[in-house]
Image (cartoon, rainbow, N blue to C red):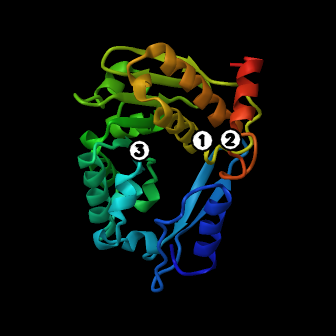
Amino acid sequence: FGDDEFGHMLVEILKQNGVNAEGCLFDQHARTALAFVTLKSNGEREFMFYRNPSADMLLTEAELNLDLIRRARIFHYGSISLITEPCRSAHVAAMRAAKSAGILCSYDPNVRLPLWPSAQAARDGIMSIWKEADFIKVSDDEVAFLTQGDATDEKNVLSLWFEGLKLLIVTDGEKGCRYFTKDFKGSVPGYSVNTVDTTGAGDAFVGSLLVSVSKDDSIFYNEAKLREVLQFSNACGAICTTKKGAIPALPTTATALELISKGSN
């Protein structure tokens, strides 16, 4: 984060939400990145970013708290940190440290095209670390972008599969999600809710899924358990779309279970 009002505010919000912030750093020479979200009438959004360069882009390998990474159960990352140096090298070093410590590597590419030099640079950058992950979550739009094909066609989805991947999830918005492992595949329907703002829905989905994985990673090999966990994650993603904002709209376990018990999927 930049050593500025925005950076300190964000770290304070993390702490208020029970997140361990000991790995957070403040850069005195760069600003915190800003993202402005414009909502369309259907709750979908457009992003506008201010980074020139922002503090997150300047994270170096030497600044990494590798001990903190090695103490984790899961190392979760996106692709925005791959766009420029020195952050790209820091990202790769952190990922390798996690991998060599036997920590589960979780990848949500989170395509944000305005930040990349070109669409092809985004594809190449995202795919450059694809085969390092144990678990990957992509949206249907991201499948279409990465494969340049129809996301509903299973052949295209399976072109993203590789030997060694434990679980590939495709989120299909309000329709729910599809799952693929070495031994089984299927889909879990979503929940119909009054959508106001889709910001954070993917994060609510993947965050709740990783909470479940951190408690019991046998879900990668047990389809009944996986389906139950994905039902919970679908509920979390749905609830997140019913309020404006990302963090303020995140559900609790109780609200997710309540939606599941209503069974409106």
Name the secondary structure under disc 2.
helix
Disc 3 residue type? Ile
Q: Is residue 264 above or below residue 134?
A: above
Nearer the N terminus, badge 1 or badge 3?
Answer: 3
Residue 192, position as x, y percentages in the image: 71, 25
* Observer-nearest of 111 and 64: 64
- Which residue is rendered at x = 53% and y = 74% of the image? 32
Q: How far apart are marks 2 and 3 (CA)?
A: 23 Å
- Say the numbered circle drawn on residue 100: none
Q: Name the residue under label 1.
A: 204
Name the secondary structure under disc 1.
helix
Disc 2 residue type? Cys
Q: Distance between the residues labelled 2 and 1?
A: 7 Å
Q: Nearer the viewer, mark 1 or mark 3?
A: 3
Nearer the N terminus, badge 2 or badge 3?
Answer: 3
Disc 1 residue type? Ala
Residue 148, position as x, y percentages in the image: 34, 36
Residue 203, position as x, y percentages in the image: 55, 44
